[in-house]
Image (spheres, rainbow, N blue to C red):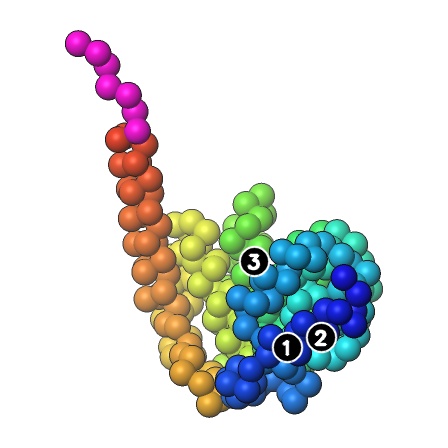
Amino acid sequence: MTLNQVMKQLEAMGTAQNRKIYARHGSGPEQFGVSFANLGKLKKQIKTDHALAKELWATGNTDAMTLATMVGDAAQMSARDLEAWLKPLDYYLLVDVFVGNLASKSGHARAKADKWIKSKSEWIGRAGWLLVAKLAMEEQELPDTYFELLIERIEGGIHTAKNRTRDAMNSALIAIGLRGPALEKLAKAAARRIGKVEVDHGETGCKTPDAIAYIDRSKKHRRAKKAKSRAGRSRARPRAST
């Protein structure tokens, strides 16, 4: 599909209601208001097309940029590309999909996390801490000592960090706490000392999760899921004939 074809489809898929919702979340006026369900349908049609992704990103349209992260090829994103794509962002949902779909899968995740968490920019800082959360959830070979230092950094800086950076730091603390018993203990202890994390979510119903409660709920959910899986495997085993 060409850029013109995709942009026409995006415009046709947009709704006034979605534009209002996305505006309340912080999206700028350059948007059609396309649902994520419809973006997913377009992704299935396009599959992976990195050249098109670059064109979509360059439009500055929120829906097109979101789709760009879905059809782009993370393997083709250089360290310089990641910096260039992140630089203009000032909307947390775009930062989130950029990190989740591209930066975290690019092969530069740890290097960028280490760099971006030091930034004074609200959005670059957010991207860095979201990458930390991804590393905590997905990179099992990283040692606990790496995350222990990050817990200390979160505790020491979360209350003075900028709004959306603060939100991502809280998410990172939760993700680190879910890696294993030792880090869970450290993360919960830090969360107690940190206390309530205040984040302004604008005119939305979003709330900042309590780190300790969220870790506990997630662990409970994991245990229930494992128990259900074991029960399913047990029922599926053929019984011995008598």
Which span of residues is magenta-colored? 236-242
> Which residue occupies the foreground of this view, 213 or 4?
4
Q: Which mark is residue 134?
A: 3
Q: Earlier in the sequence, mark 3 or mark 1?
A: 1
Q: Using a 10 Å C-alpha cutoff, classify the residue at mark 1 as few (fewer than 14 neighbours), some (14 to 19) or many (20 or more).
A: few
Is residue 229 shown to the viewer in this render?
yes
* Residue for point 46% across, 51% down: 179
Q: Say which amino acid is labelled 2.
A: Lys
* Residue 12 - label: 1
Q: CA distance from mark 1 to mark 2?
A: 6 Å
Q: Amino acid at mark 1?
A: Ala
Q: Residue 83 location in percent, x, y?
A: 77, 69
Which residue: 72% across, 74% down? 7
Gap in Å between the C-alphas at discs 3 and 1? 34 Å
Q: Secondary structure at mark 2?
A: helix
At a point 40% along the width and 83% down the height, the residue shown is 205
Name the residue that disc number 2 marks.
8
Q: Mark 1 and mark 2 in contact? Answer it, CB < 8 Å.
A: yes
